[in-house]
Image (cartoon, rainbow, N blue to C red):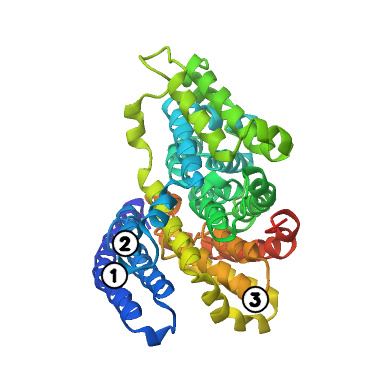
Amino acid sequence: MSSGEVHGNNVQSKGEHRSENVVRARIGLALGPFLFALILFVPAITGLEHAPRATLAVTLWVSTWWITQALPIPATSLIPLVLLPLAGATDESTAATAYANPIVFMYMGGFTIALAIQKWNLHRRIAMSIIRMVGTKGQRLTLGIIMATAGLSMWISNAATALMMLPIGLALIEEVRERNFYDDRDFSRFAKGLLLSIAYAASIGGLATIIGSVPNAVFVAQADVLLDETVTFAQWFAFAFPLTVLLLGFLYLYMTRVAFRVNGSPDIGSEFAREQLRKLGPMSYEEKAVLAIFAAVGTLWMVVGFIPDAVLEVFPLSDATISMTGAVLMFLIPARQERGGLLVWNDMMELPWGILLLFGGGLSLAAAFEDSELTPWFGELLGGLEVLPYAAIVIALAAIVLFMTEIMSNTAVSNMLIPVSVGLGLGMGVDPFAIMAIVALTSTCAFMLPISTPPNAAVFSSEHITMDDMVKAGFWMNIAAIIMISLFVLLWQPVMLSSGG
């Protein structure tokens, strides 16, 4: 198949996807209010009192619009602020206060620091430095791309990371093409493996930190609202980083030894990375300042959990405080190449404000769950599952959530299912964190379809990737994710991330 034919097929697929989205949105537009009215005005369906029934009705409306994207997701996320008080689910103060949860400000600070990293090109310097360090001989090139992509995705959104790494990957592919290291078949396999590695590493890297993936932050915020449990940056990192490393290791071996194995061992030399770094020039004052703030924030996030309580009583620090301090410093420390600070307020136009509203909407629903006492109802409803082996429930739930995320937004899946998973855990008599972690982790790992994640869509836009390539490679990545995440929840979560521990 020629590159023109591949590109044409990609364009056709995207056109069909847009048409499907319109139909889905129209259905959702009517379905959301219908479900709301059905649950709210027919009490016999649930047998609930008015307040928890109203909370469930609002949740169904909002979840339906999140899933179908009948309205933009951030706009839908404002509905709880209006409907929860009007429907009698909870009071206005409870619904509104959730939008100012500390996790929202932690994410805002992280986004702001990421903007500064991107503004001054520090992200590109970090990526090229990793590639130069790992090397460009044989499969080390793919390993370097995976490490750089995952490393950046721990701190920057997976979409931004993939879009930044895609031009680097395409430049490396062109370099290999010009040097004729491979015949046509092997070159095609090399290009596919490299680009899919970027997409998958961008998603996997986000698992490691609270700010790396939206579902992780939803987990932390819902734990605070529904269980009154604080999960620190360091606690999540200690739990999820080993999983991230194992998944990245599998990704590298699968891409280079199984799915897209090639004959030969190219060595494009270290000139490529050096040339890219040379084009960036010497490290500027602004880059050094941003790097210093970034390093300080990251270090404090990691160590604050080990600071004695007596010290924290005198000098209170939290993940949100550290994050926002770093963000404010970006405006406070002056730049030399332009007027103002390292960031100016116009830069904040690029901040993904919609994600912050999404957090607020999800947390507002969670607050209503708690206030109206809807969570125990879910526990009773799902308690019958406890007759099944715990391991079977974990694996089945991981598979269900992961494949749901293939066709739905992971933000919608996590906001919809994490509050329910609290009730499921309580109903089964197991640690709710285990069920919540299954939802949070698997809803980030969707590898089969271009619509599943922004990184998948980014690399699919390249002429090198077909739908068949992504489905075949992504299916086995999904299976690996289900197995590894299930094992980590069964064996590692009780040790590193137990509620009340």
Q: Are marks 1 and 3 in contact (CB under 8 Å)?
A: no
Residue farthest bottom in this picture: 44
Q: Are marks 1 and 2 in contact (CB under 8 Å)?
A: yes
Q: Which residue is mark 3?
A: 428
Which mark is first along the chain, 3 or 2? 2
- On screen, residue 69 versus residue 358, left or right, reads left
Residue 50 can be seen, yes or no: yes
Instruction: Identify which amino acid the numbered label 2 is placed on.
Output: Gln
Residue at x-position 67% and y-position 35%: 312
Local secondary structure at mark 1? helix
Which mark is first along the chain, 3 or 1? 1
Give the image quarter of residue 130.
top right
Local secondary structure at mark 2? loop
Q: Is 316 situated above or below 499? A: above
Instruction: Identify which amino acid the numbered label 1 is placed on.
Output: Gly
Q: Is 101 situated above or below 286? A: below
Residue 177 can be seen, yes or no: no
In the rendered structure, find residue 28 and report the number of the disc placed on it.
Answer: 1
Q: Which residue is mark 2?
A: 69
Q: Residue 24 appears at what percent x and percent y?
A: 29, 69
Instruction: Identify which amino acid the numbered label 3 is placed on.
Output: Met
- On screen, residue 34 versus residue 482, left or right, reads left
Local secondary structure at mark 3? helix
